[in-house]
Amino acid sequence: QSMLTQPPSVSAAPGQKITISCSGSSSNIGNNDVSWYQQFPGAAPKLLIYDNHKRPSGIPDRVSGSKSGTSATLGITGLQTGDEADYYCATWDSSLGAGVFGGGTKLTVL
Amino acid sequence: QLQLQESGPGLVKPSETLSLTCSVSGGSITSSSYYWGWVRQPPGKGLEWIASIFYSGSTYCTPSLKSRVTISVDTSKNQFSLRLSSVTAADTAVYSCVRIRFGVLNDYYYYYMDVWGKGTTVTVSS
């Protein structure tokens, strides 16, 4: 059971926008920065967002991140079929003294 | 460009110890900006953070695995390693090594994994 809660799946049509939520607590998201990862089947995860909203070089600006209180949100606009993947949030849990992941969300572009 | 490469047995017997090594190329493991760690993913399941280490030896470990995990670093070889003892079938997973940016700024921990190895599959079976 993950410390961070994500919806198991989201779906939308090409060109549309989606958001993926990540809910935690004061010991993790509430007081620490959040990162997001994209994972295609059989491949290693890739960093999409760090420090809640920052994008690494090469990540398009149609990908965004935000945080409010004990929840974080990943947004992707202008959906493409190539965005179909699993998405994970992660942060540090100060009470556990450990990193924690969300359970992952499968994005389907219909 | 920094790269990480996992190595180790793909098959481990139950109750034995899983041992993996991550080789770092294109950069130094003694960088003061990064921790180094391990993440695993059981078949069909999500990601699980295991442990991390700084080149000086400072370590963190997820509580559920703490009694079985040893993470170490060999700066002379630019490598770090994971040992997981008393394995069971539940430890079957793809194990990936990662580079981690980790620290405290304005009372907030920043923590993210910016470089990943390709991962290595470890199966626990007799």
Image (spheres, rainbow, N blue to C red):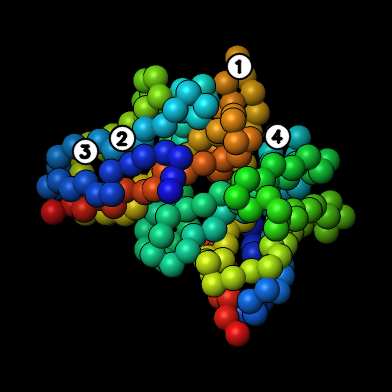
Mark 1 nearby-residue class (10 Å; few <14, some 14–19, many ≥20): few
Mark 2 nearby-residue class (10 Å; few <14, some 14–19, many ≥20): many
User: For the residue marked with disc 3, what is the amino acid?
Assistant: Ile
Where disc 1 sits, the SS reads: loop
For mark 1, what is the residue?
B107
What label sits on residue A103 in the rendered view?
none
Number of marks in the image?
4
User: For the residue marked with disc 4, what is the amino acid?
Assistant: Ser
Q: Are marks 4 and 2 in contact (CB under 8 Å)?
A: no
Mark 4 nearby-residue class (10 Å; few <14, some 14–19, many ≥20): few
Which mark sits nearer the N-terminus, 4 or 1?
4
For mark 3, what is the residue?
A18
Left or right of A110: which side holds A30? right
Distance of label 4 from label 2 (alpha carbons): 29 Å
Do the dots labelled 4 and 2 sit on one chain? no
Is residue B54 among the parts visible in the rendering? yes
Where disc 3 sits, the SS reads: strand
Residue occupying image coordinates x 24% and y 49%? A9
Distance of label 4 from label 1 (alpha carbons): 18 Å
For mark 2, what is the residue?
A21
- Quadrant in which the C terminus of chain A appears: bottom left
For mark 4, what is the residue?
B33
Disc 2: host chain: A
User: For the residue marked with disc 1, what is the amino acid?
Assistant: Asp
Q: In this picture, is B102 found above or below B19?
A: above
Do the dots labelled 3 and 2 sit on one chain? yes
Where disc 2 sits, the SS reads: strand
In this view, the mark in front (3 or 2): 2
